[in-house]
C-alpha cells in the first residue's frame, strides 16, 4: 500500500508541555503493567490526561522502544487500520511488516482472512522487533467497525511475548477484556486512577503555573472539578488573566456555586476573553483535525496563522503540538467540539465556505480528509467528483470500506448522477464476495455510463461483470462479457486480466489451442509494456490449468524467467504463486524432487503470507499426489488434511471441491481403504450444483468405476468408464485429476483384453513422449503400473516407460490394495521373471539378464505376488 493515505503525524507521540507534572504513581503502574501484562487499558472520559500520560513514557522509560498510533474515524477500514499498524511498528524497524504490506491491497474482508494477515504480522514482529516494546493505540473509541476489533482481538490472542499493547479510550472497547482479566493479562487505569489527587492539583496550579492559590482555594477547585485535569487547565487559563487576588477569590466563589457544567462555563469564559481576531480564528479552524500554518491561512483567508498558533501554544490555550518541531497542532478534543458548536451557532453561513476552503487546500495531500470536508459542507457535486478522481486508487490500495463509506455519504440522487460511483460500489461488492449485489450494481453502472456517453469506463465495468460470472462458473456468460470488454478501451493491466480469464474459460470449454493463444497475447503485452502492474496481473491470473501440457509448461517457464529478470520482490505472494506454478511444471516434466522442493517453498511462503487460496488448495493437492506416487502415504495425508482443513475454514465453490475429493478418493482406493473411498464418493455426489465446471460429472463417474472395480463388478465399471470417456473427450481441464482412458485401459487389462488396453494406452504414451510430459501418466500412481509393464513388454516407448516404472516403483511397495484379479494369467515377462526367481537369481541378476533396472524387477515381483495372492 502506498503512503499517500497515511498521515505521518499520527505515528508520533505528542511532545510534552513544559508545565506537565510528572505523574510518577501512574508511570510506575504503567511500567509494572508492561512487564507483566499483555494489555494495559486507560479508559476514562475526555480530558483526564490519558494521552499526556502515555506521551511521557519515552521520557521516563528512554530504554523502552515505543510505537505510537493516534486513531481517527477514518481508520475503521480494516485495510487502512492494518496499514497504520504496520507503519507504526516500522518506526521501530522498517523491516517489520514487509510481508504484510503487499497483502493489504488484496485483502478479503472475512474475519478468517483478517486473522490470517494478523498471523503474518505476528510472525514479522517475532522476527524483527526488540524485547520488550510497547505499542500505544490512542483514541480507540473513535473506531466502531467490527472488522477492526476482529484484528485487535486476534492480535491480543496471539500477542508476541516481547510486545505490550496500551490502549487509550473514552469507553471500554468490544474486546475480550473479561477473558484477559480472568487470565491476569489485563492492567487497567480508569477515571479514579487518572483524576488528579489534591497534591497533584496543588503542584499543577501553584508550582507549574505559579498561581499562588491558598489551601482553601485549591480545595474548592479540586472539589469542583473532581480532579479533572482538563477542567483544571481551563481554570488556570481563566485565573491567570485575573490580576488581583480578590478577583480570583470572587471567580472561585462563583465557580463553586454555579450549576453549569464546568467545562461549558470555563470554555465560554475563555473564548469570551479572546480578542475578535483570535476568537474568529478559533471558530473558523475548529473544523480542522490538524492545524498547520498553511492550512489555517487557507481556511481563514488570512496570513496571521503563524502568530496566532505560536500565541495559543505559549498560553496553553487547549492546543496540543503533535510534532517535536511544534509546527502541527490540534485542539483538545473537548475544546474542538465546543468550538464547532459555537461556529454552528454563531456563524452558520460560514460553515460550508470554510469546509470548501479546507477541501481545496487538502485535496492533493490528504484526499480522504478533503472529501470529508466536501461532505460536511454538503457540497455533493464537488465530493462526487473528488471521489471519482481517487476511486481507482482506493480500489488498488484495497481501501474498500473507505471508498464505500465516502460514496454512501452522498445522497442517492447524486450517486445516480455519477454512474462511476455505482461502478466503484459494484467492484467493492464483488471483491467482498457479495456477488448478487455486485452484479446488480455493475449492471446499473453499465446502463448509467452508456446513458451518459461515458465510454471510458465501459470496458472496465464489463471486465468486472465477467469476473463475477467467472466466480460463479457461468462460463458462457463470462466468455461473452470478456469478448465484449476486449472491444472497448481498458487499462493494460485489465487487458492482461481479461486475456488470462478468457484463456481459463476457453480451457474449460475445451479449446486449449485458443487458450494458449490468449496466454501468448497476455505475455506479449506484459513484455512490450514492461510495467510491473501488468506482470502482477498476469501472475495473479495464472492457474494450474496454465501449466497443463501441451504448451503450458513452456509458457509458465517463460513467465518464470521473465519474472526472475523483472520482479524485484522475491519474498511476497507473487513469488509464492510462481513457485507453486513451477512445482506443477516440474511435475509434468517428471521431476518429482524439484516439484516437491518448489511446492514446499510455496506452501511455506503461503503460511507466512496468511494462506493464499491457490497455494493452500491446488499446490497442497499436488504435493499429496506426488507423495502418493512416491509411496509416502503419511506425508500425502498431511497435505490432504491441510487442503481440506483450509476448504472448511475458507469455503470454496463446491464444484472445485469435487476435484480434490476425487484425488483423495483415488488415494484411499489405491491404499485399500475402500470404506473411506465410498464415503468420499458419497460426498462427491452430494456436492452437485446447477452450475458445474465441466469435469465434475466425469470425476464422479471415474470414482464410481473404481468402487465398482473393487467389488469385481467389471461390467458395470466398464460401462461407467466408457460414459466417462465420452463426457471427458475434449475437456483438457481433466488433465491434472486423471484420465478415464487410463482407467478404462486398466480395466480392460484386468478383464483379459491386453490388446484393447494397449490401444487405449498407446495414444497417451505418444502424447506424453512428444510433449515431454511424463506427469500425464505419473498422476495415476501405481494404478498404471500393470499397463506400463505391458507396454514395456510390447516395446512401446521403452525409454519413457522404463523411466516411469522407476519413478512409480517406490509407490507400489507401500500400496496395500488387492483388486480381485483371480483367473487372470501372468504376462509373458512375469512368467520369465518367475522362472528366474525359481532358479535362485537375485533381483540384480534378473535385471542384468532381462536388460531392465532393478526397480523394474521389483515391480514385476510385487505384481506376481499380488496375482498369486501371496
Image: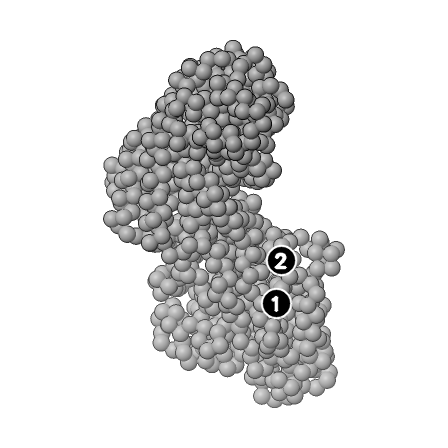
Identity of the residue drawn at 41% across and 43% down: 582
| Residue 202 can be seen, yes or no | yes
Residue 784 sits above or below residue 41 on the image: above
| Residue 447 can be seen, yes or no | no
Identity of the residue drawn at 27% across and 48% down: 527
Identity of the residue drawn at 54% across and 53% down: 120
Q: Mark 1 vs mark 2: which is more N-terminal?
A: 1
Query: Which element is circle 1 on?
Result: loop
Identity of the residue drawn at 54% across and 24% down: 836
Give the x, y percent position of residue 214.
70, 86
Quarter of the rendering occupied by the C terminus:
top right
Give the x, y percent position of residue 260.
63, 68
Give the x, y percent position of residue 797.
37, 27
Q: Single out the mark in the foreground, 1 or 2.
A: 1
Dot 2 alpha-carbon crowd within 10 angstroms: few under 14, some 14 to 19, many 20 or more: many
Which sits in the foreground, 158 or 798? 798
Dot 1 alpha-carbon crowd within 10 angstroms: few under 14, some 14 to 19, many 20 or more: some
Quarter of the rendering occupied by the N terminus:
bottom left
Which sits in the foreground, 486 or 317? 486
Farthest residue toward the top?
Answer: 715
Tell me the CA gap for discs 1 and 2: 13 Å
Residue 245 sits above or below residue 720 on the image: below
Q: Which mark is residue 159?
A: 2
Query: Which element is circle 2 on?
Result: loop
> Position of 801 compared to 676: left or right?
left
Which sits in the foreground, 547 or 140? 547
Residue at mark 1:
131
Residue 179 sits above or below residue 843 on the image: below
Amino acid at each position: 500500500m502506498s503512503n499517500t493515505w497515511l498521515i505521518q503525524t499520527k505515528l508520533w507521540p505528542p511532545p510534552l508541555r513544559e508545565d506537565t507534572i510528572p505523574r510518577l504513581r501512574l508511570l510506575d503502574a504503567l511500567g509494572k503493567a508492561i512487564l507483566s501484562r499483555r494489555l494495559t487499558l486507560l479508559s476514562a472520559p475526555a480530558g483526564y490526561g490519558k494521552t499526556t500520560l502515555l506521551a511521557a513514557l519515552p521520557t521516563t522509560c528512554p530504554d523502552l522502544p515505543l510505537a505510537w498510533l493516534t486513531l481517527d474515524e477514518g481508520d475503521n477500514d480494516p485495510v487502512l487500520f492494518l496499514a497504520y499498524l504496520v507503519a507504526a511498528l516500522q518506526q521501530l524497524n522498517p523491516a517489520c511488516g514487509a510481508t504484510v504490506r503487499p497483502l493489504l491491497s488484496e485483502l478479503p474482508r472475512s474475519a478468517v482472512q483478517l486473522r490470517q494477515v494478523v498471523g503474518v504480522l505476528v510472525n514479522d514482529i517475532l522476527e524483527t522487533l526488540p524485547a520488550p516494546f510497547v505499542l500505544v493505540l490512542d483514541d480507540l473509541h473513535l473506531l466502531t467497525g467490527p472488522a477492526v476489533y476482529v484484528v485487535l482481538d486476534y492480535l491480543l490472542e496471539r500477542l508476541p511475548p516481547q510486545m505490550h499493547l496500551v490502549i487509550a479510550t473514552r469507553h471500554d472497547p468490544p474486546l475480550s477484556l473479561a477473558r484477559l482479566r480472568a487470565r491476569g493479562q489485563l492492567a487497567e487505569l480508569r477515571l479514579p486512577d487518572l483524576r488528579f489527587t489534591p497534591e497533584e492539583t496543588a503542584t499543577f496550579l501553584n508550582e507549574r503555573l505559579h498561581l499562588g492559590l491558598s489551601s482553601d482555594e485549591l480545595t474548592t477547585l479540586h472539589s469542583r472539578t473532581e480532579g479533572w485535569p482538563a477542567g483544571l487547565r481551563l481554570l488556570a487559563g481563566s485565573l491567570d488573566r485575573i490580576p488581583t487576588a480578590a478577583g480570583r477569590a470572587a471567580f472561585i466563589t462563583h465557580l463553586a456555586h454555579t450549576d453549569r457544567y464546568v467545562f461549558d462555563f470555563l470554555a465560554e469564559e475563555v473564548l469570551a476573553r479572546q480578542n475578535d481576531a483570535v476568537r474568529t480564528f478559533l471558530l473558523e479552524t475548529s473544523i480542522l483535525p490538524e492545524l498547520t500554518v498553511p492550512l489555517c491561512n487557507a481556511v481563514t483567508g488570512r496570513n496571521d496563522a503563524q502568530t496566532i498558533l505560536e500565541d495559543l501554544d505559549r498560553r496553553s490555550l487547549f492546543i496540543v503540538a503533535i510534532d517535536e518541531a511544534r509546527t502541527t497542532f490540534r485542539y483538545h478534543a473537548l475544546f474542538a467540539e465546543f468550538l464547532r458548536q459555537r461556529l454552528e451557532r454563531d456563524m452558520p453561513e460560514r460553515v460550508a465556505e470554510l469546509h470548501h476552503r479546507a477541501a481545496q487546500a487538502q485535496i492533493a495531500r490528504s484526499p480522504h480528509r478533503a472529501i470529508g470536508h466536501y461532505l460536511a459542507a454538503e457540497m455533493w457535486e464537488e465530493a462526487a467528483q473528488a471521489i471519482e478522481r481517487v476511486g481507482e486508487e482506493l480500489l488498488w490500495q484495497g481501501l474498500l470500506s473507505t471508498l464505500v463509506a465516502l460514496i454512501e455519504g452522498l445522497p442517492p440522487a447524486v450517486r445516480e448522477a455519477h454512474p462511476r460511483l455505482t461502478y466503484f460500489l459494484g467492484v467493492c461488492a464483488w471483491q467482498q464476495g457479495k456477488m448478487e449485489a455486485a452484479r446488480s450494481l455493475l449492471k446499473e453502472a453499465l446502463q448509467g455510463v452508456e446513458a451518459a456517453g461515458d465510454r471510458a469506463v465501459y470496458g472496465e465495468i464489463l471486465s468486472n461483470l465477467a469476473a463475477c460470472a467467472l466466480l460463479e462458473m457461468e462460463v458462457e456468460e463470462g466468455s461473452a462479457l470478456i469478448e465484449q470488454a476486449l472491444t472497448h478501451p481498458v487499462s493494460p493491466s485489465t487487458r492482461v486480466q481479461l486475456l488470462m480469464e478468457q484463456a481459463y474459460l476457453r480451457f474449460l470449454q475445451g479449446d486449449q489451442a485458443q487458450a494458449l493463444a490468449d496466454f501468448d497475447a497476455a505475455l506479449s503485452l506484459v513484455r512490450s509494456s514492461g510495467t510491473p502492474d501488468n506482470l502482477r496481473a498476469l501472475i495473479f491470473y495464472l492457474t494450474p490449468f496454465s501449466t497443463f501440457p501441451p504448451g503450458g509448461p513452456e509458457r509458465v517457464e517463460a513467465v518464470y524467467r521473465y519474472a526472475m529478470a523483472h520482479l524485484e520482490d522475491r519474498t511476497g505472494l507473487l513469488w509464492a504463486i510462481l513457485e507453486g506454478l513451477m512445482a506443477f511444471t516440474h511435475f509434468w516434466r517428471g521431476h518429482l524432487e524439484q516439484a516437491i522442493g518448489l511446492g514446499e517453498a510455496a506452501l511455506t511462503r503461503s503460511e507466512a503470507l496468511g494462506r493464499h487460496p491457490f497455494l493452500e488448495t491446488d499446490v497442497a493437492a499436488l504435493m499429496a499426489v506426488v507423495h502418493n506416487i512416491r509411496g509416502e502415504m503419511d506425508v500425502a495425508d498431511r497435505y490432504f488434511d491441510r487442503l481440506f482443513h483450509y476448504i472448511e475454514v475458507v469455503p470454496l465453490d463446491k464444484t472445485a471441491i469435487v476435484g480434490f475429493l476425487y484425488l483423495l478418493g483415488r488415494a484411499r482406493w489405491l491404499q485399500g481403504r475402500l470404506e473411506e473411498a465410498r464415503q468420499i464418493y458419497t460426498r462427491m455426489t452430494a456436492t452437485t450444483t446447477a452450475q458445474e465446471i465441466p469435469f465434475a460429472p466425469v470425476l464422479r463417474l471415474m470414482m464410481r468405476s473404481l468402487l465398482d472395480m473393487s467389488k469385481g463388478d467389471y461390467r458395470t465399471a466398464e460401462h461407467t468408464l466408457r460414459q466417462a470417456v465420452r463426457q471427458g473427450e475434449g475437456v483438457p481441464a481433466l488433465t491434472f485429476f486423471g484420465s478415464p482412458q487410463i482407467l478404462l485401459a486398466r480395466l480392460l487389462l484386468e478383464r483379459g483384453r491386453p490388446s484393447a488396453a494397449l490401444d487405449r494406452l498407446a495414444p497417451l504414451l505418444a502424447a506424453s513422449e512428444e510433449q515431454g510430459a511424463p506427469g500425464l501418466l505419473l498422476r495415476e500412481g501405481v494404478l498404471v503400473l500393470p499397463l506400463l509393464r505391458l507396454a514395456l513388454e510390447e516395446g512401446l516407448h521403452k525409454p519413457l516407460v522404463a523411466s516411469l516404472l522407476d519413478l512409480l516403483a517406490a509407490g507400489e511397495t507401500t500400496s496395500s490394495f488387492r483388486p480381485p484379479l483371480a483367473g487372470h494369467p501372468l504376462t509373458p515377462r512375469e512368467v520369465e521373471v518367475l522362472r528366474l526367481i525359481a532358479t535362485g537369481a537375485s533381483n540384480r541378476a534378473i535385471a542384468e539378464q532381462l536388460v531392465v533396472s532393478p526397480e523394474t524387477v521389483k515391480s514385476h515381483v510385487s505384481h506376481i505376488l499380488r496375482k498369486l495372492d501371496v
